[in-house]
Amino acid sequence: MKQYYICYPEGKFKALTFSYDDGKKSDRRLVEIFDRYGMKGTFHLNGGLFPESESSRKDPERISGSEVATLYAGHEVACHTFTHPTIARCPLDKVTEEILEDRRALEALVPYPVQGFSYPNGSYTEEIKRLLPALGIEYGRIVGSSHNFSLPNDWYEWQATCHHNHDLLKHGEEFVGLAKQQYLHLMYVWGHSYEFDNDGNWDLIESFCRSTGNKTEIWYCTNIEFRRYLSAARRLVFSVSGETVLNPSNQPIWVTIDGEIKKLHTGLNKLA
């Protein structure tokens, strides 16, 4: 009997992604670092808090809405609610409004549906989690650190490997050194770019990206790319004989069969 394994694109078994909140001007420097080292990040923004918005809670340190499409090109723009309330305290209908209005505002700035989400102030409830799929949200990132490289068990309670101030370089070294391919691994880093200004430690993220970036064995992806790829991979349908496999998604999926890398295109694939 042959062994079949799902892989990341091009047969890789390690993936790296980032998640940064609030859309402050320090994102400009962070994006430049990511771009230099071939990284991809997800940036969670509040559509009602851009400096030129009509909201009374304007913050001049936030980037402007007119800058969003250009600054985050090649990365993911995702939701963080319209006005950044602590949503566990809000009525559910107002949580709905916060998320949908955030999506509406951000989708006016970027050319794709905005379906990622991070909980503002780390605040959520089981009721809110159950609400998110109906609002077009595909995942919800929580705060805290797992300190491991495992895949999420719950897309709406997705915990990162670490905040960048929590053993980032140590975890990066461990991640780069992973050699066993029996498992898929994910390193996920989160934080706020303005923390690098506050803490005076831009060298930390620069060092991390230098040591983990531009490596052919790592898949660099946004949060939504990771979510969609894994979801599509889990929908593959193999025949009992293993001679054919149906890929019902709209994107290619990679597998290995007895160690040989195979790219599965949309539709029916013949393997023998």
Image: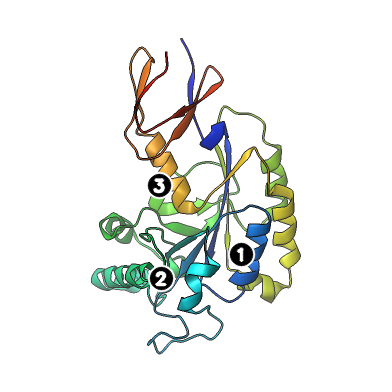
The answer to which image quadrant residue 236 occupies is top left
Cβ atoms at labels 2 and 3 below 8 Å apart:
no
Which numbered disc flags the more N-terminal residue, 3 or 1? 1
Mark-to-mark CA distance, 1 and 2:
18 Å
Q: Distance between the residues labelled 3 and 1?
A: 28 Å
Does 266 sit left or right of 18 as displayed?
left
The answer, for residue 165, to whether it is visible in the render is no
Identify which amino acid the numbered label 3 is placed on. Asp
Which image quarter holds the C terminus? Answer: top left
Q: Position of residue 238 (x, y in %)?
A: 35, 22
At label 2, counting other C-alpha atoms closer than 10 Å, the crowd grade (few under 14, some 14-19, many 20 or more) is: some
Identify the residue at image location x=58%, y=64%: 191
Q: Quadrant of residue 242?
A: top left
Q: Which of marks 2 and 3 is in front?
A: 2
Label 3 packing within 10 angstroms: few (<14), some (14-19), many (20+)? few
- N-terminal label among 2 and 3: 2
Q: Residue at x 46, y 87 (%)?
A: 58
The label on residue 154 is 3
Instruction: Name the residue nearer the viewer: 162 or 192.
Output: 192
Q: Is residue 48 above or below residue 80?
A: below
Tags 3 and 1 in contact by the CB under 8 Å rule?
Answer: no
**Could you say which disc has been placed on residue 31 in the image?**
1
